[in-house]
Image: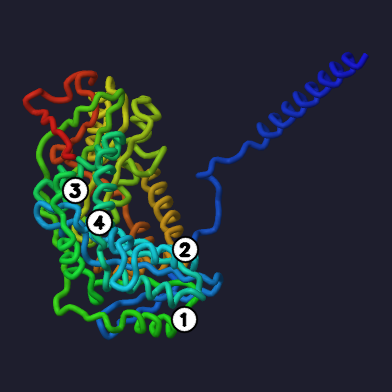
Amino acid sequence: MKIWIRRFSLTALCIIVISGTVGYADTVSKNAFPSPDRIHYKKLNFNLPDTQRVVLENGMVLYIMENHELPIINIGALVKTGSLYDPEGKAGVAELTTYLMRTGGTLKLKSDEIDKRLDVMAASASIGTSIESAQVNLSVLTENLDPTLDILAQMLIEPAFEQDKLELARQLKIEELRRIKDDPQKMAFREFNRLIFAKDPRGHLSSIKSLTHITRNDLMDFHQRFFLPNNIIFAVSGDISKEDAVKTFNRHFGTWKRSHEAVNMIPPSQQPAKGMFCVNKAIPQSTIVTGQFTIGKNHPDFYAYTVLDFITGSGGFSSRIFSAVRNNEGLAYSAGSFYRARPAYGIFGAYAFTKSSSTEKTLSLINSILDVVRSGSITTHELAWAKKSINNGFVFSFDTPEQVVWQQMNLEYENLPTDFLMNYRKNIEDVTLKDVNTVAAKYLDKSKNVVLILGDSKNFDKPVTPKNRMVYIVPEE
């Protein structure tokens, strides 16, 4: 009897669920959800919050944004330096210098003591390096600002570069380089950077050989050359007033002596390696990266180029490359384009991750897409979609006071016009269909591309290029 009741109950439940599902489906079909592109909402208004700029007597620049919502203060900084200034034959000096500034102690505090003090005060601090800058970050509770900023000042002004910490950092970096071989995509983009900056210091990447030549004196020399008060810009946001910020920074950094000489960024030579290159690796997939030098942020065509890149491949599912290579042909699980714009120059490229047997087909398809885009095929629908997406996304770069003040600081670091951010959305909106197609015809010349393929060349669908034109390279360790 109990079994019969259970079966009856289960049957009844199924009938109810099915009936409910059918009813729901009918409701959905009658009231179909509209496409996101057809949803109407108020136009997003963008008003850049005010920040305050202060220059201390020693030349240090502060951008300050007061916000008392949380008892937290965030401090960021940019230093005019980077790995492009590594000494000849010693690539890795900049990275090890900043790493040891954080982990290698100061003249007053041992490295272990610094870690303990920061942990007790629930503060986080980091110092790192990229190709064209060094970055400093500190987050701390308001009540702990003074002792924490004292530690940061010691790191920046008088690092000790403890020898044992240098040896540890060297071994960690060497192990990281060895592990890059296990990450095909990371290795491919690393080698692409080496090729695109073939005749420029930006292409001198650290290797096991270069790291073994670096000494403690190299770090000290690098620090003394670049870490100076008139070569650093700070962004301060959170639970602090302008007056308190100035007093606190003067207290901890006021005696830091400025240099009579300012550091000016060296522009790249823009002479990439020519041809098609292959890193042979016995894996079932290929990573394709192809690109060239192009215009930067200070060029009049920058905004049209930004829209062009979005339509070509950086705009996700609806962009030309992603849609054709992944959605239509199913040749790659990821594909697209990128536009890395600096003030004086930029790099535009395309990429795809595909199986070995479709390497040539995928590269040919990307090239054909670039040719079609260059022929003036951008449509008014694509233009409207791209401009709307770019401008809506731009607003979210200013979600927090920390982001706002960092963006303002970065303007000065890159020596861009003070109204660059305020006018960005309008300049994007003013891009016309003629502008985009003109820029495409002017700059998208695939014959200028550096092409790198990382994969198993013997399993490519067919030779990507005649053997005498394919250059096989072995990545440095």
Residue 182: x and y in percent read 30, 34
- Residue extending farthest to the right is 1
Residue 108: x and y in percent read 32, 73
Residue 177: x and y in percent read 25, 42
C-alpha gap between disc 2 and disc 1:
25 Å
Q: Residues within 10 Å of mark 4 (few under 14, many from 20)?
A: many
Looking at the rendered structure, the secondary structure element under dot 4 is: helix
Which color mode does the image show?
rainbow
The structure residue drawn at horizontal position 40% and vertical position 29%, both measured from the top left corner, is 327
Q: Can residue 85 be seen in this view?
A: yes
Looking at the rendered structure, the secondary structure element under dot 1 is: loop
Q: Is residue 123 left or right of residue 178?
A: right
The structure residue drawn at horizontal position 13% and vertical position 33%, both measured from the top left corner, is 473
C-alpha gap between disc 3 and disc 2:
32 Å
Of 211 and 287, nearer the camera is: 211
C-alpha gap between disc 2 and disc 4:
22 Å
Say which residue label 3 marks: 206
Residue 258: x and y in percent read 21, 80
Q: Disc 2 residue type?
A: Asp
Residue 166's mark? 4
The structure residue drawn at horizontal position 23% and vertical position 24%, both measured from the top left corner, is 456
Disc nearest the viewer among 3 and 2: 2
Of 253 and 329, nearer the camera is: 253
Q: Disc 1 residue type?
A: Ser
- Which badge, 1 or 4, is on the more N-terminal residue? 4
Q: Disc 3 residue type?
A: Ser
